[in-house]
Amino acid sequence: MELLDDSDDFDGVPLSQRAMAARPAPYLEGLNAAQRAAVETLDGPVLMLAGAGTGKTRALTTRIAHLLIQGKAWPGQILAVTFTNKAAREMKDRIGRLLGETVEGMPWLGTFHSISVKILRRHAELIGNGELHLKPSFTILDTDDQIRLLKQLIKAENLDEKRWPARQLAHLIDGWKNRCLTPGRLPKGEEAAFDGWGGRLYQAYQDRLLTLNAVDFGDLLMHCVTLFQAHPDILKGWQDRFRYILVDEYQDTNVAQYMWLRLLAQAHKNICCVGDDDQSIYGWRGAEVGNILRFEKDFPGAQVIRLEQNYRSTPEILAAASGLIAANSGRLGKTLWTDAEAGEKLRLIGHWDSEAEARWIGEEIEAFQGGHRAALGPVSLNDMAILVRASHQMRAFEDRFMTIGLPYRVIGGPRFYERQEIRDAMAYFRLVVSPDDDLAFERIVNTPKRGLGDKAIQTIQTVARQNGVGLLEGARIVVEDKHLGGKGLANLRDFVNGVGRWHVDATDDAISHVELAERILDESGYIAMYLKPPPDGWDEDRDGEWPAIAKDVEAEGRLENLKELVKALEDFDNLQGFLEHVALVMDRDSDESGEQVSIMTLHGAKGLEFPVVFLPGWEDGLFPNQRAMDENGTKGLEEERRLAYVGITRAERLATITFAGNRRLYGQWQSSMPSRFIDELPEQHVEVLTPPGLYGGGYGAAMAHAGGNPAAQMQDRAARADVYNSPGWKRMQARAAERKTAMPRTGVTIDADPAAGFKVGDRVNHAKFGDGQVMGIAEDTLTVQFDAGFKNIKASYVRPAGDDQDVPF
DNA sequence: AGACACTGCGCACCG
DNA sequence: CGCAGTGTCT
């Protein structure tokens, strides 16, 4: 087959001639020796061990620019793989900047998944089981679809969904796919997983995916590998094409990705892998640190280049991080160093509970922002981040920051395209584009409510199966033959006709795909679902059009998201192109507007940096995470330690570690011990803070004990336990216990006047939402109408409007 | 079919 | 605690 005929691979003029004539290689200036070696060692296998903050991305992008400028390869002959879309985007930007122009001609710079899709689309018909095969138009299922599908299969086998949860099976199958184990390749022992049903259900799932013309994320990699293995000629074509291969975050590759890379690199061995074994934090989802540790064996003659000069952090931060990670075994070993001047020690502080922790961090952030920490000067909110171990920790901060009106942004969490309304809208688009997309049909046939319940769906399914057609076509037959009665039938007819109409529209140039999308969402009644219905007796002819008002704040947000979705369509030529993009790439909306503190998980923070970093929740069980340790023993603990290392090394100038004595878990208060990682921090680089004297001398004294004798604390865990057995600590616990028992579980507040004297109609002020009016009162919660809409808010968070006093707390 | 109450379960995460 | 999934009622 002809592989080199694609226009997208070779557009753009040879960069080599143009750029080389003009300048002698200014892009190499300012690189240190190691970086320069990493850039200039172009041929043969190279392992770039790049510690945190050592200019890895710079080396990588410069290397690509160098390849292009030296004329070693065309843009279309370089394969550059990243893990996240964000990383891919950033690399594209930076290469563009290096070359002084936008490089549209790097078609093979992307994530493992996006590149795999491109490859698979060209050979889809070769993926199959003999009877069925994929079509190039295959859809990519996300986790949600995957679970729904598995649930159906488990049901089909008459298994109890409680005893065999689909989630668990999904996990199992993902694990197999991560290791490139097709159903046929499962080792004997493993197919018996899931009480003996594992192998069988896996096979059934794969078959079902084929009939749906669909793949899941794991398939993208696995199918590529099996394709390459079964068709040497095709593999050869791709090997010839990709003359140079670069891989970012190599320590996070799993077995499937490793096989994928090896197959592609085998022929010419021009592969450059970049990674840091100390930052391997994805073992729990199949990443193999072994891949990076084994590189020199896999690629004999590999050159290993170490990037060890750190340009990001102060010596204190580096020393603390290095001291911590030294406790891990089996490292490749790196010594980060910096010539930056001395900065501040890491700070360590304990708090009574997670709320106190959030409160304190909030105050610190405000103090930094106001410049009240002289050493740093005023710090922008954008330059501060809170990095948590588990996402549930975020809530305490959100609550607190909301209360004090501190702008924040949560990074991670449910992503844009995972939201219900987006997925619904996408299902509409999918069904319009591919009428036999049964999963899309199932998702939206009764959304909005069309009076089609379980029974109606079953009828449609039966009819579809009898006629050997998809569900939409089945529904059409149901409508024609009137297998259904009453309202449901009429609604189903409208629905089927609507999809038919839109499908025609989609192939018609008369209407743009953006307009079409709006039309679909409108005519389907989907938008109306989130709008206030007109009152009874509202007559459009007489009263005019009922204005579009969202039902509530939540609906308002959803409508906003839908608007954004439609707007995003403008960047594409048609719906198909958009759907393709969204399945893999669509990120959450990143409104970069204004100054905001970032809150994110440690996993989400990898690759980022902030001048000021807060690391809350350093308690045994939470961090290191109990489950990680239970399930993976020492390996799990070491991965947690690497995560701690990643966290500390995000900080440029100041890192603050905090822990709380009590934390709510599943709604229950639990007390906990400070993290064992705290013991592992080199004491000379840590300053133990005494918390503000909220609780009198006892607590302060206890902390002073911890701070005054760090050595004792370091050497002997029992000594640290002493801290928490000190009289002050005990007094505090006793007092808190009193408060807890006084705080009844029934939810009745102790406050005699829970609504704090507010009555309906009062004007109130809230730190974040501004002025509003009380519309309703339930116990201690007020319903307040702000400019931003209605909010339910605890009475203690608002104050009478115009009252200049601080929020009572 | 749809609304509502009740019960049991669970926190990493990117494609 | 918050959610999703189930059961019960109208």
Image (cartoon, coloured by chain):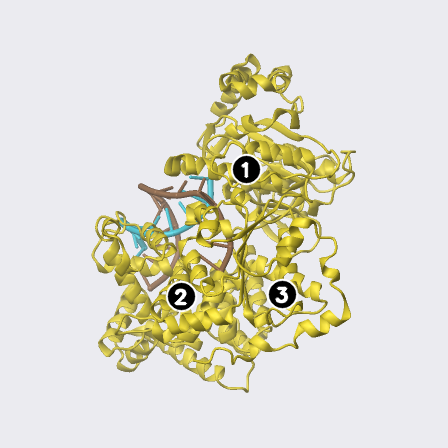
Chain colours: A yellow, B brown, C cyan
Label 3 neighbour load within 10 Å: few <14, some 14-19, many 20+: many
Q: Earlier in the sequence, mark 3 or mark 1?
A: 3
Whole-angstrom CA distance, mark 3 to mark 1, is: 36 Å
Residue A778 visible in the shown view:
no
Picture quarter with the N terminus of chain A: bottom left
Label 2 neighbour load within 10 Å: few <14, some 14-19, many 20+: many
Whole-angstrom CA distance, mark 2 to mark 1, is: 35 Å
- Above or below for A471 versus A52: below
- Look at the numbered disc 1 and give the secondary structure of its residue: helix
Q: Which residue is at a point 62% across and 37% down the rendered structure image? A: A614
Q: Which residue is mark 3?
A: A67
Q: Any mark on residue A644, and which?
A: 1
Q: Amino acid at mark 2?
A: Cys
**Which image quarter: residue A759?**
top right
On whether disc 2 and disc 3 are found on a single subunit, the reply is yes
Q: Earlier in the sequence, mark 2 or mark 1?
A: 2
Q: Nearer the viewer, mark 3 or mark 1?
A: 3
Whole-angstrom CA distance, mark 2 to mark 3, is: 26 Å
On whether disc 3 and disc 1 are found on a single subunit, the reply is yes
Q: Any mark on residue A224, and which?
A: 2
Q: Nearer the viewer, mark 2 or mark 3?
A: 3
> Quick check: A351 left or right of A422?
right
